[in-house]
Image (cartoon, rainbow, N blue to C red):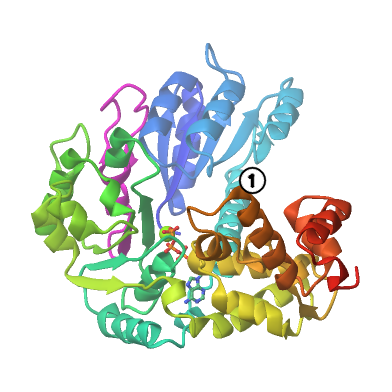
Amino acid sequence: MLEKKVLVVDDDSLMKDFLKEALGRSDYSVDLASTGEEALEKIKDKDYDVILSDIRMPSMGGMELLEATKEYLPDAEVIMMTAYGTVENAVEAMKLGAFDYVMKPFSADAIEMKLKRAFEQMRLKKENKSLHQALENTYSFGNIVGKSPQMQKIFESVKAVADSKATVLITGESGTGKELIATAIHYNSSRKDGPFVKVNCAALPEGLVETQLFGHERGAFTGAIRKSRGRFELADGGTLLLDEVSEISPGLQAKLLRVLQEREFERLGSEETIQVDVRIISTSNQNLKERMEKGKFREDLFYRLNVIPIHIAPLRERKEDIPVLVEHFLNKYNLENRRSIEGISQKVYEMFMEYHWPGNVRELENCIERAVVTSKGKVLTLRDLPKEIAFGKADFASETIGVGCSIHEAEKKLILKTLELQGGNRTKAAEILEISTRTLRNKLQEYGLKEAGDDQ
Ligand SMILES: Nc1ncnc2c1ncn2[C@@H]1O[C@H](COP(=O)(O)OP(=O)(O)OP(=O)(O)O)[C@@H](O)[C@H]1O
Ligand SMILES: [Mg+2]
């Protein structure tokens, strides 16, 4: 931990002096406040680690300050100082999230012990957080799977560009792995120990994207109750991922262009110019070049972002990746769910290779995860798949029922194809068609297919 920032809040000036002196001797940086209100102002401006506050103070008391601290500085720990008669309040404060309390009068050693424990607690919390994140995200390059020439080429590009500072633009349909590739570039670069910061440009209204990117000063706009650092600042020394960059407004495009050119910007409501050392990767599932040609995206910005383009083809155009992806996801979800599914049936394999995968790798991953969790057997069968994949619904509809075909004809085709895909299993076919087996039998009779098979 860098500087250990402590705020002491007490209306008793002797107490403040004593603490400033005692804690100043250790490596704490100590600020003082005489009232709850004054403390609150300080909290809004500085990221304290520990607040050491008296419980009983004129006007805004320690309890109120505790609540405000939880709001503005959720990661800070609060230690309450109580005098005789307010111990009950201290216990109450702990229930509300205070870390500890100390009874007045106390020695310098006693308070130092408490502070030490508070900082230890914070360190553990932080460690836990990053451990959790590391487990959640499989960053290693080895976790991107792909056998197709298209993916092999991407692997080469990732290796080649990782260590440069060059700006990368990753394009591809939703679910093709843009974020995964961006993550791999960061973690294979010399910036890997620096921050990897993401901004989703599509998910936020214009004003918010701007403060997210550049930060703001306190009071820059209504609701800006405390100073905030933007993602550009947070990413200093690391990588900034601009997700869905095609979505940003013309005004913001101009500002972004400046940062890309000069690597400097100002926080909203501030004159001070901030310089950063950030590598930028952006993604888009829109064709940015097309948007540029239509005048929706600035040309100069496009060329700044598109220094190194990486395009990820849709899964349906690189079907050789499907088997390796299936194996990869089976391993992953077997492990996660303590299952031991050995593979997929021949029929499932065929369906996977035939399906058009509008949701790309994400859809395949979700499909396998769900099947691993719900399957009863050792091998995944058509039963374990969502309907639209198991019966190639979309392909079927577009390929075999053309406009100009009568309802009666369409119905017949639908029924026969479904039955065929079900290997003649009428119960299953009826279920998919959402009709009763009796209706199905009647329809088949109508088509002269009465004797066609056993009802399994
Ligand atoms: N080649 C791959 N190997 C292993 N997993 C992959 C691969 N491609 C994608 N995935 C997985 O598929 C899921 C979707 O990938 P990701 O979020 O990177 O897609 P995206 O292109 O950013 O999608 P969107 O445009 O919707 O944001 C993730 O869980 C990712 O790990
Ligand atoms: Mg994404």
Magenta residue check for 233? yes
In magenta, the rendered stretch is: 212-241
User: 382 above or below 12?
Assistant: below
Residue 56 spot, x, y in % from top left: 61, 19
| Dot 1 amino acid type | Ala
Q: Nearer the viewer, residue 353 or 125?
A: 353
Image position, residue 136 (x, y; %): 58, 65
Query: From the viewer's perspective, is residue 343 above or below residue 281?
Result: below
Of the pair 205 and 21, the residue shown nearer to us: 205
Indicate the position of residue 419 as horizontal and vertical percent values.
75, 67
SS at mark 1 in the image:
helix
Place residue 61 in its image quadrant: top right
Residue at image mark 1: 110
Quadrant containing the C terminus is bottom right
Rendering quarter of residue 283: bottom left
Which residue is at 51% across, 65% downward? 399
Residue 214 higher or lower than 340, as above or below: above
Horizontal placement of 197 versus 392: left or right?
A: left
Query: Residue placed at 53% from the left, 73% from the top?
Result: 138
